[in-house]
Each structure stands twice: as C-alpha cells, then as structure tokens.
Amino acid sequence: MKKMVAPSLLAADFSNLSKDIEIVNQSEADWFHLDIMDGVFVPNISFGIPVVEAVKKHAQKPLDVHLMIVQPEKYITAFRDAGADLLNVHYEASPHLHRTVQEIHNAGMKAGVTINPHTPVALLEDIIEMVDLVLIMSVNPGFGGQKFIEHTFHRVEQLRNLINKKNSKALIEVDGGVSTDNSAQLYEAGADVLVSGSFIFKSDDPVQTISELKK
Ligand SMILES: O=C(CO)[C@H](O)[C@H](O)COP(=O)(O)O
C-alpha cells in the first residue's frame, strides 16, 4: 500500500487559508483534499469553484477534489479549469457513471468514484477497471469531525479483493473520522490514501500529525 495522506481543508482556518495551505506544502502530505458540498446532495454547504482556484495558486501538491453535489457531470470542466488534478464524483449522484468517468478523463484529470457508507462495494464491479481511485466514506458525508464507522475496515478489504480480482490499478482512499486510532489498521486493510481534516488541523502540530498518519 502507498500510505498517502490528503489533509482536508474543510477543517482549515478559512480566515487564514494561505497559512494552512503552507503547512500542507511544508509537510509530508501527498495531496490537498477539497470538499465541495451543495446543500442538496449533503445537508451542508462548504465552498465552491473560486476557493479551489485560490487554493491552486498556493498549493504545491495535487488537488484531490471531492464533489458532494448533485449532477456532478455538469461541472467537470469548471473544476478542471479551477485546478483539480483528481475529481471524485459520488456513485449515488451519478446515474451515468461510465460516461462521467470518461468525461473526467477526457478533461485531463484522474477520475475517482466515492461511495457512501451504505453503498455496497460490489456495485463497483463493472467500473473498477476504469477508475483511478475509489473513495470510501467512513462517515456519512456532509460534516467534518464525525465518528469513524468501524465497518469501514471490512469494506476496504472487500474493495482490495475486488481490485485484485479485476487487476485494477485503482487506489483506495478513506475519508471521515480518520486519526492515528485507525490509520495503521486502514493501511493494513488495503487503503492507499487517508483523508483527514479535524485530526490534523485541530492538533498542536499539524506537520507532525501528518507524519504520524503516514506510519
Ligand atoms: O468529506 C468530508 C465530510 O463529508 C470530510 O473530508 C471528512 O469528514 C474529513 O473530516 P474529518 O477528518 O474531520 O472527519
């Protein structure tokens, strides 16, 4: 497994975002994770395209953008132009997922598919060879600072088995309630990338916390 970390800016200080971006730049983090919420697909609104553009100006690492929005296919080129390197769309919001993944690739980005905690991993069987990443939500999406759902370990193992069976190159990413209480077990179950927000940005030393999450 790769043991990558993608700090979620949802937990950053929005009144001083460039300071937290610099912390991630200086750390061992691999990507920036940006959570886009529309108040329809999830019961919360976060930030949108202008903030992604602003982050891109300062970020020295790839932008992993997680769209928690309805009709994500409408905004593929807009997020590409804003600076997304990897675009994650929800399985549950994408009735034409195969086409949407193709369009993300055609726009020049890596394509990720995200599944909510109740969505069976097996539903990815016919798309897994096409995608660059699967994001398993380990909380119900919409808010930072929630409790990690323990059943996630089993879901990561199921996904690892599916990826191996299909000879897919997809990375496994996990998001929600991630901390050093579960990071080692997640990597052991087969995760490649861990997203973490509150645990990093509410800690006394975020750079050190990021290093600890990679162990
Ligand atoms: O996608 C998200 C919420 O929908 C956040 O990225 C996720 O919850 C990370 O926050 P935390 O580490 O604080 O749980």
Image (spheres, helix red, strand yellow):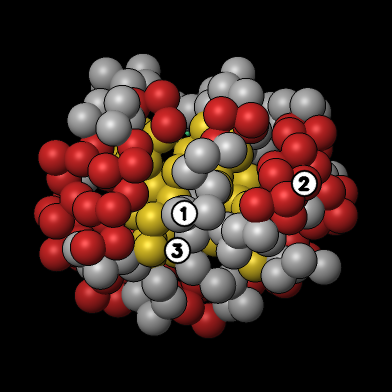
Q: Is residue 107 above or below residue 30?
A: above
* Helix, strand or loop for disc 2: helix
Residue 135 in percent (x, y) is at 54, 45
Figure quadrant of residue 118: top right
2 and 1 marks in contact (CB < 8 Å): no
Frontmost of labels 3 and 2 is 2
Task: Point out the tag, 2 or 1, that comes first from the N-terminus.
Answer: 1
Estimate the x, y position of residue 100 in percent, counting from the top left.
27, 44
Q: Amino acid at mark 1?
A: Val
**The residue under label 2 is which amino acid type?**
Asn
Label 3 SS: strand
Q: How far apart, in angstroms, are the residues tagged by discs 3 and 1?
A: 19 Å
Q: Are marks 3 and 2 in contact (CB under 8 Å)?
A: no
Q: Quadrant of residue 62?
A: bottom left
Q: Residue at x 23, y 53 (%)?
A: 103
Of the numbered discs in the image, which one, if any, rests on residue 131? 1
Residue receiving disc 2: 161
In this image, 21 relative to 196: left or right?
Answer: left
Q: Judge by depth and name the residue closer to the eye, 77 or 95.
A: 95
Mark on residue 32? 3
Q: The C terminus appears in which quarter of the rendering?
A: bottom right
Amino acid type of the residue tagged 3 in the rendering:
Phe
Residue at point 39%, 48% (across, down): 88
Residues marked 3 and 1 touching at CB (< 8 Å): no
- In x, y percent, where is residue 14? 33, 51
72 vs 119: above or below? below
